[in-house]
Amino acid sequence: MKNICVLVSGGGTNLQALIDAEKNGLIKDGRITCVISSKEGVYALERAEKAGIKTFVIPRKDYDSIAAYTKAVTEAMQAEKADLIVYAGFMTILDEQIVRAFPYKMINVHPALIPSFCGKGFYGLHVHEAALAKGVKVSGATVHFVTEECDGGPIILQDTVQVQNDDTPETLQRRIMENVEWKILPRAVALFCEDRITVKDGRAYVDL
Ligand code: GAR
């Protein structure tokens, strides 16, 4: 049974999808053992508490460098004996210390079809604003391993939605969350926990 630690910063709908997937037996070989938030007072913490999951807040604002912040999160993950770390709407880019401590043991959900609309500055609604500004006709989400390159690690799962003429960033975000993120993130976590993902030459291969 793998220990899953989830990093959050906001509303936590992806965390909720993971909690539900564990409850429904979709995630069989792992359990969510803790949730860490980079901000106090976010709704994701309430979702975790309601599900009886241990929570910590490690406020980003209390650390004056990304290195010091990464060290604190890395040490917390080591103390929790994390086998898998899930970035579920976690809005801080951590540095290479945590990547070295947890190689190919961290996954992130990104609300676009990587390599489009990703990297520094592309997070939350900004991603959907950029997709609409470009006029893309499909968008979607990606679950990938976290490496030193922001949003650049091996892709595990992706899926798409159609973009509609009258979409706003909010309507597109919602369609992508409901139809893609809340499905592919729990599926990727289940696959990881069942040891069905391998990485070779920078690519992830999934035994579906
Ligand atoms: C989700 O759309 C997630 O993909 C995105 O933020 C939202 C968080 O929602 N993450 C990023 O943009 C990270 N680069 P949630 O807190 O309800 O899960």
Image (cartoon, rainbow, N blue to C red):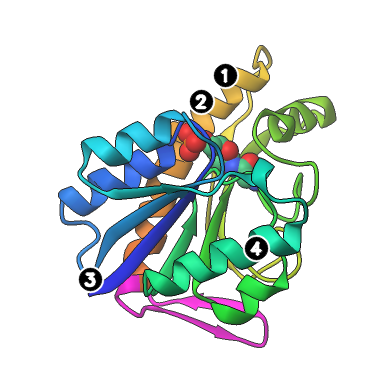
Disc 3 versus disc 4: distance between alpha carbons? 28 Å
**Mark with earlier residue (3, 2):** 3
In the image, 19 versus 45, the foreground residue is 45
Residue 103 in sight in this render: no
**Relative image position of residue 60 (x, y in whole percent):** 64, 45
Task: Indicate the secondary structure of the residue bearing disc 2.
Answer: helix
Asked if the magenta segment contains residue 202, the reply would be: yes
- Identify the residue under disc 2: 174
- Identify the residue under disc 1: 171
Residue at the farthest left position = 24
Camera-side mark, 1 or 3? 3
Instruction: Establish if 172 lies above or below 47.
Output: above
Q: Residues within 10 Å of mark 2 (few under 14, many from 20)?
A: few
Name the amino acid, label 2.
Arg
Disc 2 versus disc 4: distance between alpha carbons? 30 Å
Disc 4 versus disc 1: distance between alpha carbons? 33 Å
**Mark with earlier residue (1, 3):** 3
Mark 2 lies within 8 Å of ligand 1 (Cβ measured): no
- Give the residues in magenta: 193-208
Q: Quadrant of residue 128?
A: top right
